[in-house]
Amino acid sequence: MIYDHKYIEMSWQKKWSDEEIFKADIKEDKEKFYCLEMFPYPSGKIHMGHIRNYAIGDVIARYKLMKGYNILHPMGWDAFGLPAENAAINSNIHPLKWTSDNINHMKEQLKKLGISYDWSKELTTYEPSYYIWEQKIFVEMYNKGLVYRKRTNVNWCPECLTVLANEQVEDGKCWRCSSEVQVQEQYNWFFKITSYAEELLNDIDKLKNWPPRVIAMQKNWIGKSIGTEITFKIKESNEKLEVFTTRPDTICGVTFMSLAPEHQLAKKLIAGTEHERDGQHFINSILKEDKKVRIATDKNKRGFFTGKYAINPITGYEVPIFLANFVLLEYGTGAVMGVPAHDQRDFEFASSMGLEIKLVIKPVDEELNDPLDRAFVGSGYLVNSNQFNDMDNKTAISKIIEFLENNRSGKKTVNYKLRDWCISRQRYWGTPIPIVYCENCGAVPVSEKDLPVILPLNVKITGLGNPLKRSDAFINTLCPSCGGIARRETDTMDTFVESSWYFLRFCSGNYDKAPFKKEDVNYWMPVDQYIGGIEHAIMHLLYSRFYTKVLRDLNYLDFDEPFTSLLTQGMVCKETIKCPVHGWLFPEEVKDNKCIKCSADVKIGRIEKMSKSKKNVVDPDDIIDNYGADTARVFVLFAAPPEKDLEWSKEGIEGAYRFLSRVWRLIIKNINLFVEDVAHDEIKSVFSKEILYHQHSAIKKVTEDIERFQLNTALAAIMEYTNSLYLLNDKLSNGADRKLFVDSLETLLKLITPFSPHIAEELWRLTKHLDYLSMEKWPEYIQDFIKKEETILVVQVNGKVRSQLNIPRNTAKLEAMTMARENEKIQKYIKGKTIIKEIYVPNKLVNFVIK
């Protein structure tokens, strides 16, 4: 009987689907477990990274099901977004068709993997039945003051007539048409996430089962700082500059001010000056740069002098105001007081611009170079600081704050790096923002009775601007407040909004009276195990936490954190091949380490994340077709710990297939044993105890490793157990041993079920079981069977074996050392010698180091 993975997998997937064995219903008498992988964007094909994510989740879900939990394990589609719109432009296909076709294909791929999803809970975010509730929540947030609109700078392509994200700007040009990108101000909608900054930060302490790295990233993104807000008046102007600093003790060392080019005063300060055109060009060039690059420590510090001066509120000195590339609006107030003697970034900028570097803190026990060759950032006493001279700089902080407060030019305050969430997207394929604009009433939210605001499908997508702006049928409407003529908002929502609450919608399936039933979310939520890539560690998780707290305050929820435990899996990587002429190549484009297009030598072996652009992707369909879904699952689970990157290997795939084939042959070889009517005798023989030892040791190891998410070592234990069963198989004799051996084989099938469910179910059925193995109870180990009565203790003297002792297993160290020391053979080596060291490895070895 051969292992026909194609027939087996198709057969069991149909059985599971037809009988809905993974359908989730509320069972108040059972403890629930909600297992969720981050839902995918339907880009067209499942890739190996998806397989790894979903396989990890499926092991956990199936394991918990066998442990007796009531499982919710759903799947859906994050279906709005720019890629669909780009596909529509490039291929002249509507985003709805492109996305729905991709969903159908990816769904079939997921089913081929045998993931234990409850497909009755499936959701798609482009459905009005989903986004109607998102619009309703938007209106409620608006009425509660958590939504507002303001003008911000955007990258504008005059050719495509559209707003571009920073990553769509390449060398100052549009990534699609190569036109010079302009920076414009326009209105955008924001969620007031900063209102929840302190709670988001404090509640991190509740996330006990989140990876420390993610916790640190969340804390850093929120970025709480306790410091001082200081007001600098601008000379010959009514304007003022507000800065936030954690070092008010250095205020007398300010020799310049630096503003983010996005700052609201940036254009005002250069307006009407002879340098206005150059200043505007500087602003535009900086705003097109990636913000991560701007703040990089090795990035050249660039600045533009505005021609204006700020007045130091303590010294009265006039200091020049610069626009600077290394200052971001998102940090502090978007304005920074430059103290080059005591901040290395300011030192580098001042040095490059020829600005004064004024020392105001001197160390007590150290002489500084004169002039300074780098910033001094340590502690000391104040100099050049007016009335605060000679004070310890830590003591001076409170005195300086007191002075600023008395003169109404500063105050102690708390600052957050976190900025409000801009949800406006100037594109078509997204959830319409439910706002209309009336000449009499201004911006007015759409009435609840008129929701959803349906995204029109009869639009032409050309790549020139937002097609909603050209749809009169969509734009023209009546004001919900006064009934007058009004126009609809044409911006759509950031797709992060959809992913910030989808896990709640899963709890109630396609409920049509509300976003979800409160009793359902009270039963299923929070998500017990959430699984996804580290790239979502900040924005998606932070927004989901924020949205959950908002829904709590809107009386939808009774809890405030959505995810109890988080697992962030590593990437799937593969070697790349690069030609110096033609760039990245597929393997079939290489022969004898040369590019077949130009015969140039290629570089092979750089391991990178699988990516279509780098042509190092592996088609999962080919693997499933040639080796089977179970093989694909075993490979991605065994090749590396879940949190680490996984390196693709054809040898690894073949090894996984060989392992499953060995399991298959072992069961088939012993298939007749499953019908023998042999009762258990009393367990007396050494061989019986050996069988039980291997069986219960495997149960213990696999169970503990799954609980720790060490799925690779759990599989290694199953492989080791399989090897042990092959060896035991050759020693089978009496009926009692055969019965114990059958129990051990059944244990093997139960242990591999979460990892390779198709082959396990097929072998379970072939061994005359009529029920579903997936629904069987997870085996439990008995500690007494894991103990061996005796073990051999090797005794060495100076590293050479001199004797062996049979001793009770797990003998205490003192007792084992005494037995070894008193052994007759050992005595003749150590008698009259000095033992300078004793080494003990429990149950294995003693070594006496003598001289």
Image (spheres, rainbow, N blue to C red):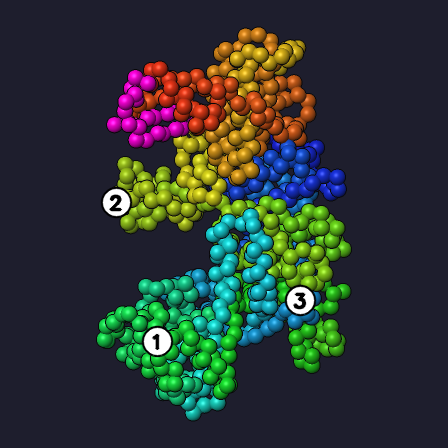
- Amino acid type assigned to the residue bearing label 1 in the image: Tyr
Mark 1 and mark 3: Cα distance apart in space: 50 Å
Position in image of residue 717 (x %, y %) = 49, 28
Say which quarter of the image contains residue 650. top left
Give the residue displayed 49% in from the left and 45% down from the top: 569
Residue linked to disc 1: 381
**Dot 1: what SS?**
strand
- Mark 2 belongs to which amino acid? Ala
Residue at which label 2 appears: 600
Name the mark nearer the viewer: 1 or 2: 1
Quarter in which the C terminus is drawn: top left
Q: Is residue 561 left or right of residue 614?
A: right
Residue at figure coordinates x 41%, y 23% from the top left: 818
**Which is nearer the N-term, disc 3 or disc 2?**
3
* 830 inside magenta stretch: yes
Vertical comparison of 784 with 614: above or below: above
- Give the mark nearer the N terminus: 1 vs 2: 1
Element class at badge 2: loop
Q: Residue, x 75% and y 50% (percent of image)?
A: 519
Residue nearest the observer in this picture, 34 or 438: 34
Task: Check contact, mark 1 vs mark 3: CB within 8 A.
Answer: no
Say which residue label 3 marks: 141
Which range of residues does the magenta coloring cover? 827-851
* Figure check: 1 above or below 120: above
| Residue plotted at (51% across, 79% down) | 411
- The amino acid at mark 3 is Met
Based on the displayed image, in which of its 4 quarters is residue 9 positioned?
top right
Inspect the magenta stretch and tell me whether residue 572 lies in it. Answer: no
User: Total number of numbered labels?
Assistant: 3
* Quadrant housing the N terminus: top right
